[in-house]
Amino acid sequence: MALTEQEKESARAYWKTNVRIILISLVIWALVSFGFGILLRPMLAGISIGGTDLGFWFAQQGSILVFLALIFFYAWRMNKLDAEHGVGEE
């Protein structure tokens, strides 16, 4: 079964959007975990949160919480994208 040109274009748009969401999520995760937790930790040392400095908090808790938030965001956004392109689960 050959795909029509419209179906091919929809598939391209779907995967382009999917890859963009993944890349944005990975950049956010890398920035929070590696950037804030390691590279920018000395700059964040003066800011206190929960009895410790912000850089330490990002290294120990913040990156995990952001990762969990990104998982839920990705699932929500992909369900929406699936519905837009007619490939959602039934």
Image: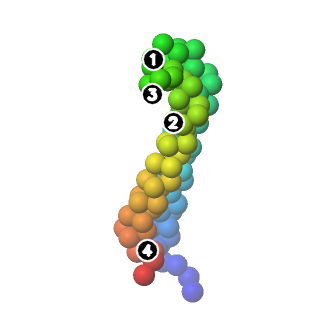
Tag 2 residue = 62
Of circles 4 and 2, the one toward us is 2
Number of callouts in the render? 4
Dot 3 alpha-carbon crowd within 10 angstroms: few under 14, some 14 to 19, many 20 or more: few
Give the Cα separation between the discs numbered 3 and 1: 10 Å
Query: Disc 3 vs disc 2: which is toward the camera?
Result: 3
What's the residue type where badge 3 is placed?
Gly
Q: Measure the C-alpha gap from mark 3 to mark 2.
A: 12 Å
Residue kind at label 4, given as amino acid type: Gly
The residue tagged with tag 1: helix, strand or loop?
A: loop
Q: Nearer the viewer, mark 3 or mark 1?
A: 3
Q: Residue at the spot x=51%, y=49% of the render?
A: 68
Compared across the picture, whether 78 is left or right of 59 comes to left
Q: Amino acid at mark 1?
A: Ile
Question: Quick check: marks 4 and 2 in contact, CB under 8 Å?
Answer: no
- Residue assigned mark 3: 50
Which label sits on residue 47? 1
Counting residues from the N terminus, which is met first, the one under dot 1 or under dot 2? 1
Name the residue beneath numbered marker 4: 88
Question: Do residues under tags 1 and 2 come within 8 Å of each other at their CB atoms?
Answer: no
Q: Residue at x 57, y 86 (%)?
A: 1
Q: Position of residue 25 (x, y in %)?
A: 51, 45
Q: Is residue 2 visible?
A: yes
Q: CA distance from mark 1 to mark 2?
A: 14 Å
Q: Are marks 3 and 1 in contact (CB under 8 Å)?
A: no
For image coordinates 51% across by 22% down, the residue present is 52
Residue 35 horizontal/vertical position (percent):
58, 27
Which element is circle 2 on? helix
Q: Is residue 27 visible?
A: no
